[in-house]
Amino acid sequence: MIRILLFLFVVFCLGVGFAWLADRPGELVITFSGYQYEITLMVAAVAGVAVVALVMIAWWVIKSIWNSPRAVNRYFRARRRDRGYQSLSTGLIAAGSGDTGLAHKMRKQVSGLLSSDQEPLLHLLDAQTMLLEGKHEDARNKFEQMLDDPETRLLGLRGLYLEAQRMGERDAARHYAEQAADSAPQLIWASNAAIETRTMEQNWDGALKLLDSQLSTKQISREDADRRRAVLLTARSIDVLDTDPALARNVALEAHKLMPDFVPAAVASGRALYRQGEIRKGTKILESIWKKNPHPEIAEIYVHARSGDSTHDRLKRARRLQSLRKNHVESAMAVARAANGAGEFTMAREALEAAIKLEPRESAYLLLADIEENETGDQGRVRHWLSKAVRAPRDPAWTADGYVSEHWAPVSPITGVLGAFEWKVPVERLGSVIEAEDSDVFAEIPIIPEPDSGKDAGPEAIVVEAEPVAVVEAAPDQATEEDLQAAEPAVEEDVADKADEPDTDTSRQEDDDRPEENEEIKADGATAPEAHQTPAPAVDDADAADIADESDTVPLQPIPDDPGVEKDPADKEAPGRFRLF
């Protein structure tokens, strides 16, 4: 635009000059070699301008002829460069799309058109082509060569970082990321890797400094920065709780302020406040997050707020949590644990029954087994609840990348990602379990009660329906359901009536009619009184002969607390039999 205005100005000045000369006529006399030439002033001016123009044109022609070799060389060089850049662009696109053949072809073509000193991207095309061809060692050497050039240093660090990650060399990958982060903190991949490295080294100040630089350069959003900062501050509070409780308190409160719904931050805040004696403030924080997100760690810290409390005081605090969030499985589990510790087994059972109705889980059945052990000591019922626990869904846990941890951690031990742990049910392991509902095997197990010292009780046979059991590697000669029923007691007696009956000669005669059973009892070393022995089932002679002929009949294996059907100790256990557990 300026050139156009300048040209118009020059033309305007020439026009004004010629108009001025035309308004003022005059003559120009030139004497040369004895001759006198007279011309008008206008003609002289036009002739002067023409001469200047001819001189300029002549100079341009001579200069063009003089510079023509250089111009021709420049033309071909520019054409060669354009072809090289076109091939480089095509090669990079082919390498990115995975076309090994085209990328290799363009690499050879570019190497003849461009030099590596002229275009640094040629190193990238070489490295990418080597990676596609599987020459990882050559590619790493090429990336290392890029470190010497300031223009390609970051590109080389990025390539070495990705290669180290591919090979599983996490320490080497962190090393390259640290170098890149020191040179260019604005690189999001380098700063993230450096933050994870410093977090695993427990360098909390360094990680927070890098996080602040990410936020200042707008690499991450404010919400993401607050979440990461809360994770780092929570980890720092947990780390310094034993050495500096005051610092742990301040750091945990800052993390809780950034993320009020973050359970680890609330737990760290409550633990630090209780350590400092601020019971009311810690209780307020834990109660506020319990209303939004009940968690067993919150209940544990809340119930044990004061170390000197009695078990019933802890039970009251657990019931307080239950009143804040009713009809929730964690509330019921907190009450059940506290009631079990306080010896209130009935309350614990009721709470666990409510929890199982809301969400059946493994810990509920295990706690029921503990209650049964503490209250009654009935091993049969304990095994019943343990079998339930085996088949129940797993409890939620801190999980990151398939790794299950008992406690929360700031980074994943598998990938090193910051804030990767989540509270969820772990993925079940592969395998199939035969559920109890799908099994048709049931057993009526006679349980002989312990004899009362100083009292003569009549024979008692209590028939209990056992829980369904899973079949474990059944052999082809397994017993059928009819065989199992044949091996079980066939007569159920009323316990109350039989306890009142006197000991008659008839009962002694019935005992004498079973010499084989008496011999087996003596062989096993049984010392229980005859009054407490379980009567044998009545079997006809024909049925007894049929049973003796059946070689495939396998008796039930008795549980440890139940002698079951008496057998000869010389008999070996048949393979593939059913087991109760």
Image (tube, grey):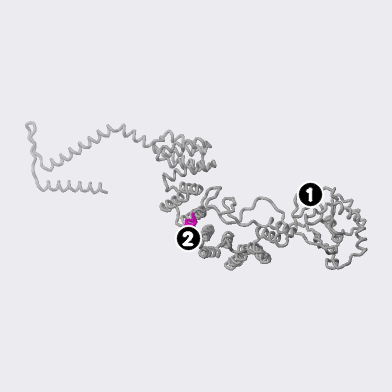
Total count of labels: 2
- Say which element carries label 2: helix
Please give the residue where the numbered disc 2 appears in the rendered image.
257
Q: Quadrant of residue 356?
A: bottom right
- Pointer 2 with pointer 1, Cβ within 8 A: no
- Say which element carries label 1: loop
Whether residue 435 is visible, yes or no, is: yes
Number of residues whose C-alpha sits closer than 10 Å to that of mark 1, classed few (under 14), some (14–19) or many (20 or more): some
**Residue 253 lies within the magenta run:** yes
Q: Which residues are magenta?
A: 244-254
Please give the residue where the numbered disc 1 appears in the rendered image.
576
Q: On the rendered structure, is 289 left or right of 62? A: right
Q: Residue 256: horizontal and vertical position, in percent? A: 49, 59
Q: Residue 153: horizontal and vertical position, in percent? A: 42, 40
Whether residue 262 is visible, yes or no, is: no
Looking at the picture, tell me which residue is in the foreground, 219 or 169. Answer: 169
Q: Quadrant of residue 326?
A: bottom right
